[in-house]
Amino acid sequence: MQHKLIYILFLFASVISYGQVNLFMESDKSEYNGKDIVNLTIVLELNGIDLEPQTRFQLPDLSKFNIIGSGSMTNTLIDPATNTLITQKISRIALEPKKKGKIKIGSVLVTVNNKIYKTEPFDVNIKEIIEKRSLASNLANEIYLNMEIEDREVYQDQATVAVLRVYSKNMDNFRKVKDVRLPRQDNLNVHPVNLNKSEIDPSGAGNMASQVVAVFMVFPNESGYVDVPSVSASVSSYSNKNKIVSNKVKLNVKKLPEGSPEYFKNAVGNFNVNVYNASKNKIEVDKPINVIVKVSGEGNLPDMHLPKIISSPDYEVFTPKITSKVAPGITGMKGEILANYVIIPKKAGAISIQTEQFAFFDPASHEYIDLGKKTLALNAFSHDQILESRTTVEKVNEYTNTLLETVNTPVLKTTTFKVKEKSKFHWNILLTNISILIGLFIMYLLFKTWQKKRTLVKETASPKPLGSVAETEKQIRETLKTDINDYFSYLENLKDNGDYQKFFDTLEEMDMDVRKQYFQSSSQEFRVFLESYKGLSVAEEYRNLLQRIQMEKYSPLKSSEGIEELLKAVVNLYSRISK
């Protein structure tokens, strides 16, 4: 009986060894740094000639990694001890982690002789990335710059946020980090979000404190694997100035889905398009008007192609002036882009202004959204129709406004009394205009009387003794000195009333008066004078401002925002020069 039992055990052992299947998966190590490659090895071992895999290896969910390489091989040998055929199928996969922390790798499945085998799942730990490129010789004073991008898998032209951190064991090193230079590369667009330093975090990686020194958005404009180049910063001390460089980060940029509209260009995000007429007056044939095409939303707003106004024989269209008002959002740059077009109608009657068709890709819904064309309906009038539509009061007001403009001076700002066109008759406005004209006439008579009396006093006054050359020059300069604030107020008034031609004429007059204060006849001589007595920076600022004034003066499109920015620059510079 005992011999039979031993025989049965040997029989079962031979059967098991004849048809044994071993499947397992392992990684080369359990802990990795952020830049390390995770190498997985999958081994399927078949002991027996009747065992044949029916399926390939079914991999687990590896969406938290970028698969950067794979390979497989098959080994066949015969065990001389048991005379059994052994077949080994080995596959290796190289993975790049997208995130840090503990990541679970699931089971691999394979079917052999109608039976499913699977491996045991396990975890790998991805440590925080720290690119250690030190400058200091003392280990206690080492400082490192590290760039972190949480979401490394995005669509083409979709935003991903990058955070730049500084690591150091010495707290004093954080104040030395300055001049952060963001990466520049043709296949991506970079826009800063916040360049202010955060609070110091004492519990950083590797027993080092950390501080965020920059946050910026990256928009890759091509698909595939895109490397975000290193970010550099300077470390300044009393003795020298050095440079530190961060790590590079690889992005997996997905292609946009197929089926995009024919006129889709590169807009990725969520947008809206609106077109409207910015001119307040009646539209007249052969007279320019301002038409605004506004694109608002959130996404790659600063880098996208804007829909243009389609040309038509009914009107003439000029190159627009682009104005942007964008700020960082959650999924991209948020705000609005304004394209200010100058349109000149070529016929009277109804005119339809159309934009190009516009579509964008929404990453949230993973689909293309077609906004089509936007249309603006206008009604243009001929010159005779404009004249016929004016009332008697409007004609009187126009005549009064013309008269007030001709007698306007920097001291007496009569353009503030200009009468706006009204659809109803107002006796108060008419009486006010008449009172202003009478008041101006009385002021003129008083001014002439005062001028005659002042001439008589000068003739009867005894001559004063002559002083030194320096005193005489100072007296002449005080006499020629212009009250620059009167010019500033007058220019502000001209800007508010939209009289841009008078605005630029007054700027030239003010510049001439300021130059006379320093006895300089031309702008070139005045710039040389400023370089000697005010410094090179003031002279360069004066030259750039004159160029900017000329560009705005002869620009076919003048916006109130651009004139206001120009006026601020004029006030800032001439206030310092005229002191």
Image: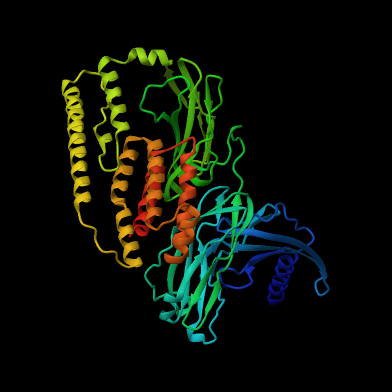
The image quarter containing residue 40 is bottom right
Could you tell me how many numbered marks the image carries? 0
Where residue 492 appears, as percent x and y from the top left, is 31, 43
Where residue 294 appears, as percent x and y from the top left, is 44, 36
Q: Residue furthest bottom?
A: 138
Q: How is the image coloured?
A: rainbow
Residue 101 in view of the camera? no
Seen in the image, is 541 located left or right of residue 24? Answer: left
The image quarter containing residue 411 is top left
The image quarter containing residue 227 is bottom right
Q: Quadrant of the C terminus?
A: bottom left
Where residue 137 appears, as percent x and y from the top left, is 55, 86
Q: Quadrant of the N terminus?
A: bottom right
Q: Residue at x 38, y 40 (%)?
A: 503
Where residue 158 appears, as percent x and y from the top left, is 53, 48
Q: Residue at x 49, y 16 (%)?
A: 347
134 vs 426, nearest the viewer: 426
60 vs 127, nearest the viewer: 127
Seen in the image, is 492 located left or right of residue 254? Answer: left
Seen in the image, is 120 located left or right of residue 393? Answer: right
Residue 396 in view of the camera? yes
Q: Is residue 284 above or below residue 363?
A: above
Seen in the image, is 304 located left or right of residue 573? Answer: right
Q: Is residue 412 above or below residue 574?
A: above
Q: Residue at x 43, y 18 (%)?
A: 380
561 vs 241, nearest the viewer: 561
396 vs 406, nearest the viewer: 406
